[in-house]
Image (cartoon, rainbow, N blue to C red):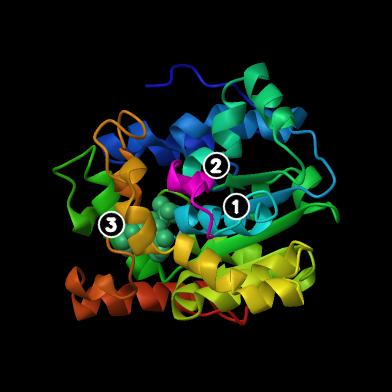
Amino acid sequence: DPGPLPKEPDDDDDASAATAAALPGDARRRLRWYQGTWVARVCVPGVVAIRQGSFAPRRGDVVLASPHKCGTTWLKALAFATMARGAYPPAGAGHPLLRLNPHDCVPFMEMLFADGSAGSRKMGALPSPRLMATHMHHAILPASISNNPDCKIVYICRNPKDMLVSLWHFTRRVQPDLAFSDVFEHACEGVSFSGPIWDHVLGYWNASKESPETVLFLRYEEILLDPAGNVRRLARFVGQPLSPAEEAAGVAEDIARLCSFEALRGLEVNTAAGSGSLLFPNGAYFRRGQAGDWANHMTPEMARRLDAVMEEKLRGSGLSF
Ligand code: A3P
């Protein structure tokens, strides 16, 4: 338990307390209803600090945003390899991604800022253009990110059915008796990490429509189909398009290969016992790496139900799964 949490003056404590009280015990410990979004409890202090101005923007910042279990690790690897390719050629034997987990290359903002002033110092020490990540909903980002033409946001989402299966497998590492049906039921009610899922995707979807030059909306399944093509998109979007010489040398393909599920999963840094955090070893971020695993965990009726919820919530937005 992270202990007492800092308060934000406009935090809706009553609604939060009422909703949290209705949660089953374990979710109550792990999640907090914050400004209309479900936030991992350990991240709340960092989120509050970011919103209260601890984050000092810098020209060229790139923020990777995602709901939990939608390909964050992959996007971190792809964006890092793409943006750092000048210093670290993706086919080079000394590439940092060969000895570091992607989460060690690109920090989560809310985790950094949960550390108080040490977090601000670490963020300030990142080389420009800075690359960082968040699970925050678009609605609760500070204006220094969401309304800043000098800050780019790359968003990744995924079919919510696969997200929930991935989330269940991940959470079971710390809660082995967790039933998939519980994760599913709560998510359909809007209660999950990064929940409500529909609000998370809609916030970034709408932002990408309003401002395509500052918000790039990616889907896990699209990257699976064409990793190198999406590396090119990413490179163009962050203002570092591949040069003709890089195209001729196959740099996009090299980055896609370096960051592929098979390549990253097999590395010692991602397999060794004792790697990663106490709760989640690095290997926990590489499970199956495919689309469609939901069919092995959901009945057709469950799938229809979640599809219907998503369809209703996303109606009129132009977005569908
Ligand atoms: P599965 O559990 O379906 O396998 P996150 O990084 O947001 O926590 O998401 C984790 C999901 O992304 C897991 O999905 C994981 O296996 C998958 N993943 C991690 N690295 C990947 C990669 N390089 N390529 C494709 N999928 C990857």
Mark toward the start of the polypeptide (3 vs 2) = 2
Mark toward the start of the polypeptide (1 vs 3) = 1
In the image, is residue 138 part of the stretch drawn in magenta? no
Question: What residue did someone put label 2 on?
Answer: 105
Q: 192 and 246: which one is in front? A: 246
Q: Is residue 173 above or below residue 114?
A: below
Q: Residue 319 — which label?
A: none
Q: Distance between the residues labelled 1 and 2?
A: 7 Å
Which of labels 1 and 3 is toward the front?
Answer: 1
Residue at 33% across, 45% down: 270
Asked if the residues shown at circle 3 and circle 2 are in contact, with their CB atoms under 8 angstroms apart, the answer is: no
Identify the image quadrant of residue 231.
Answer: bottom right
How crowded is the residue under tag 2: few (<14 C-alpha within 10 Å), some, or many (20+)?
A: some
Asked if the residues shown at circle 1 and circle 2 are in contact, with their CB atoms under 8 angstroms apart, the answer is: yes
Question: What residue did someone put label 3 on?
Answer: 287
Residue at 74% across, 43% down: 142
Q: Distance between the residues labelled 1 and 3?
A: 21 Å
Mark toward the start of the polypeptide (1 vs 2) = 1
Q: Give the range drawn in magenta.
A: 91-102
CB at disc 3 and ligand 1 closer than 8 Å? yes
> Which quadrant of the figure contains the N terminus?
top left
Question: What residue did someone put label 1 on?
Answer: 80
In the image, is residue 92 part of the stretch drawn in magenta? yes
- Image x and y of residue 42, in percent: 46, 30
Asked if the residues shown at circle 1 and circle 3 are in contact, with their CB atoms under 8 angstroms apart, the answer is: no
Secondary structure beneath dot 1 equals helix
